[in-house]
Amino acid sequence: MGKTITICNQKGGVGKTTTAINTAAYLASFGKKVLLIDMDPQGNATSGLNIDKRSIDKSIYDCLLGSTALDEIIKKVHPDNLFIAPSSLDLTGAEIELVGAVAREYKLKKALAGLEEDRFDFIIIDTPPSLGLLTINALTACKEIYVPLQCEYYALEGLTKLLYTIDLVKKNLNSEIEIKGVILTMADFRTKLTQEIISEIKSHFNEKVFKTIIPRNIRLSEASGYGKPILLYDKNSTGAQKYRELTEEFLKRQTISQPQEIKDESGPAEKTYPTSEVGQEGSTRPPQQQ
Ligand SMILES: Nc1ncnc2c1ncn2[C@@H]1O[C@H](COP(=O)(O)OP(=O)(O)OP(=O)(O)O)[C@@H](O)[C@H]1O
Ligand SMILES: [Mg+2]
C-alpha cells in the first residue's frame, strides 16, 4: 500500500482541506497515483474536487460501517492520477454509530487493507476539526501526520490537546505514527507580526516546519468554490506556485533524512504548551493594545 498521510488539526479553518486537495493534486500532476480520503462530514474535500455530495450513493461512511469495500466508493477526479473516497453527511452519525463497535478505531485501517497493493503511491486523509473517532481512525490508519497552522496569534492554541491525542494513539493504537511536518498557511506578509508568529512556531517545531509558507491568496478559496484544485483553476497564481513548491518540498523530504524531533517541551516551549494540565491550551498572545 502507498504511504498514508493524515492532515490534521482540530482547530477549524486552518487550511487542512485546502492543503489536502492541493498537495494531492500536485502529487498527481507529478505522476504519483493519489487517493484523497475525505473523513470530514462537512465534505469540503469532496465538493472541492467537484463531487456533488448529494449525488453520492455510497461514501466513506459505508466503508467505516463495514458494508462496502473502499474500492467501490473511489471516484476518479481531475487532474489525472487523482482519486477521492468521498464523504457524505451520514458520516456525522458514524461517530455515534461506531461507539459500541468492536475495534472501532481501526475501521479505516481495515478498509485500507482491502485496497489492491500498489494501487496508490500516496493516500492523503483530510480530517474534521475535532479529535473524535473519525480523526482517531485517520491517526490509526496512517504513518505520517502533517499539521497545518494558520499564521495568526492563536495558531498554537489547542496544540497541547492535539499532541496529547497523537501520543495516546501512538502508545495504544499505532506505534508507527509521527508528526512529520508543520505547514504554515494563510500568511499575510503585509502585517509586521507575521514574521514574529512564524519565528515562534519555528522555535517549537524546528526542522519540522516546511520552508515553503502558504500565503493568504484569494484564488485558493475561489478554486475550491469552483470545485477545482488551484493548478486547474489558476496555475499562475501565488497560491498555486506555493502549493507546488510545498509539494516539491514534501517529495524531497521523502528521500532525505527525516527532520529532527519536536523540541523538548520542558524548554522554552513550556511557555505555550503547559504540560501540567492536558487540555489547558497555550497560545501566542497578541501584544497589549497600544
Ligand atoms: N492560503 C489561503 N488563502 C486564502 N484563503 C484560504 C487559504 N487557505 C484556505 N483558505 C480558505 O479558508 C477557508 C478555510 O480553509 P480550509 O477549508 O482549507 O480549512 P480547514 O482547516 O479544512 O477547515 P475545517 O476545519 O472547517 O475543515 C476556506 O474557505 C478556504 O478556501
Ligand atoms: Mg476541512
Image: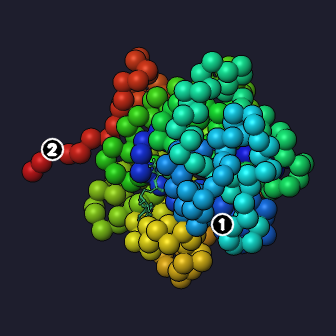
Residue 288 is tagged as: 2
Q: How far apart are marks 2 and 1 (CA)?
A: 42 Å
Drawn side of residue 2 relative to residue 108, left or right: right
With respect to residue 138, does 5 lie above or below?
Answer: below
User: What is the three-letter code of the residue carrying label 2?
Assistant: Gln
Looking at the image, the residue that sits furthest to the right is: 117
What's the residue at 78%, 64% (across, down)? 32
Residue 257 percent across, percent down from the top left: 74, 48
Between 164 and 227, the residue placed more toward the observer is: 227
Residue 265 percent across, percent down from the top left: 48, 28
Residue 244 is tagged as: none
Residue 121 percent across, percent down from the top left: 80, 56
Drawn side of residue 116 relative to residue 252, left or right: right
Between 213 and 231, the residue placed more toward the observer is: 231
Q: Quadrant of residue 144?
A: top right
Between 89 and 3, the residue placed more toward the observer is: 89
With respect to residue 183, does 107 lie above or below?
Answer: above
SS at badge 1: helix
Drawn side of residue 159 relative to residue 228, left or right: left
Q: Circle 1 is placed at which residue position? A: 25
Report if residue 59 is visible in the image.
yes
User: Nearer the viewer's eye, disc 2 or disc 1?
Assistant: 1
